[in-house]
Image (cartoon, rainbow, N blue to C red):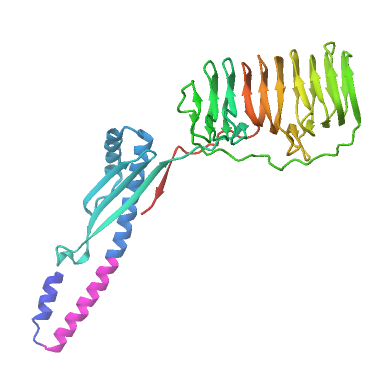
Amino acid sequence: MSWNKMLKRFTQNDSGNIAITGAIVIVTLLTAIGTAIDISTVISRKTSLQDANDAATLAAAKFDFENTATASANSLDLFNLNQDTSQLENTQFNLSFDEDKITGIATADYPLFFARILPQAKIQIQVKTVVAKNTPQYVTCIKSLNASAQSSFRVNGGANIIAPDCQIDVDSVAAPAADFNSGVTLNVARACVAGTNIINQLGLPNIIKTDCEVNPDPYFGQFPIPDDTCRYNSQTYNERQVDLDPGVYCGSFNFGPQIETVRFAPGLYVLKDGTWTVDSGLWEGDGVTFYFMDQSSGIQFNSGIAARMTPPTSGPYKDVFITEAPNTQPSNFVMNDAKGFDFEGIIYLPNRQLIMNSGATIRSRRLSLVADRLIINDANLNIQPLSGGVESQPEFQAYITE
């Protein structure tokens, strides 16, 4: 017996109040049963609709983020394939496209339990999915810190920077903030310039980004200031082989053209009140850190130099190859034509302009190069990150908002 016939029979019953009471009870019971069925079914149908919407919207992004017509057609086919349309009416799926995201919205009508009595008793179900491009997290290998200097990072003709897993950071917002001149090979994950005004003769719009959120200074305040009591004073070396020990080196030290090898015992080499001038030889040492105490201290690498060196693997200067005392006056650190610098670790010179000239070559499996300003002239850098690289992430991710 149908519900309609049952209701009619009760309402026509001449038993008086019993018929009316029975009808009310039955209607109440049917309402409760119908409501429970509706709630359960709506939840189930919405979950199914959401799953189909997620899959179709994500497929549109993976298939072609820019060809909207093709993406829409393919994702609609996938939506229809995945969507269970039982108990639903007027199912629709639509996509909208923005620069870096796609939004998919699916709607459907669910006939409520009482639609058998009241044909218009329906509820609309809607779900929404936003698929956004993930921003890769890059590891900074080369960074110029000066936020106000013009051309705080400059690469000139003949320079070659091969660092495919690295980001270059330019903190400057001056005009121009950076110079990327013609005749340069730039093979990096990204060059991120905080300012909007640069000289860019290379093009490479997918690599060189302006108005970019640079990574913070990774080493600010991390390295302790060492004792500066002099242990060694100004000296000139002319032997074929020179062996050096850690300590504080005060004044000027000259490494003559007769030198073939300079060997460094592991430890901290503090340079104070003078420059080391190096004209030849192979520098070798593991577990070595150079620390510049003041503006006048530093190393002048001239032509004919080669180096095979690594930093400490533990202690307060872990991974540090070259650094300096904080708040020293600005100065230059120059690396000229060389046979090749093969070293690892951190070069952190927040108060110096690092200048690489005429064929200077750095090869490193693990390097982080941070200075106040950087100029690379006809030099070669072939480096990998100190750790990590471009962090692996899914290219797209779905964010369900409704």
Report x, y in % for residue 290: 78, 30
Q: In the rendered view, tell whether residue 33 sits above or below residue 45.
A: below
Residue 343 appears in view = no
Q: Is residue 33 above or below residue 42?
A: below
Q: Residue at x 66, y 14 (%)?
A: 358
Residue 372 appears left or right of 27: right
> At which x and y percent is residue 202?
49, 21
Quadrant of the rendering where the N terminus is positioned: bottom left
Span colored in magenta: 15-37
Q: Residue at position x 79%, y 18% from top?
A: 278
Q: Is residue 359 left or right of residue 63?
A: right
Residue 378 placement (x, y as % from top left): 61, 16
Q: Nearer the viewer, residue 157 or 80?
A: 157
Q: Residue at x 50, y 38 (%)?
A: 393
**Camera sees residue 21:** yes
In the rendered structure, the answer to whether residue 13 lies left or right of residue 276 reads: left
**Dominant secondary structure of the residues highlighted in magenta in the image:** helix
Indicate left or right for 53 with 151 as reference: left
Identify the image quadrant of the C terminus.
Answer: bottom left
Name the one closer to the observer, 121 or 15. 121
Inspect the magenta stretch and tell me whether residue 17 lies in it: yes
Can residue 56 be found in the magenta stretch? no
| Residue reaching furthest to the top | 258
Residue 375: image quadrant is: top right
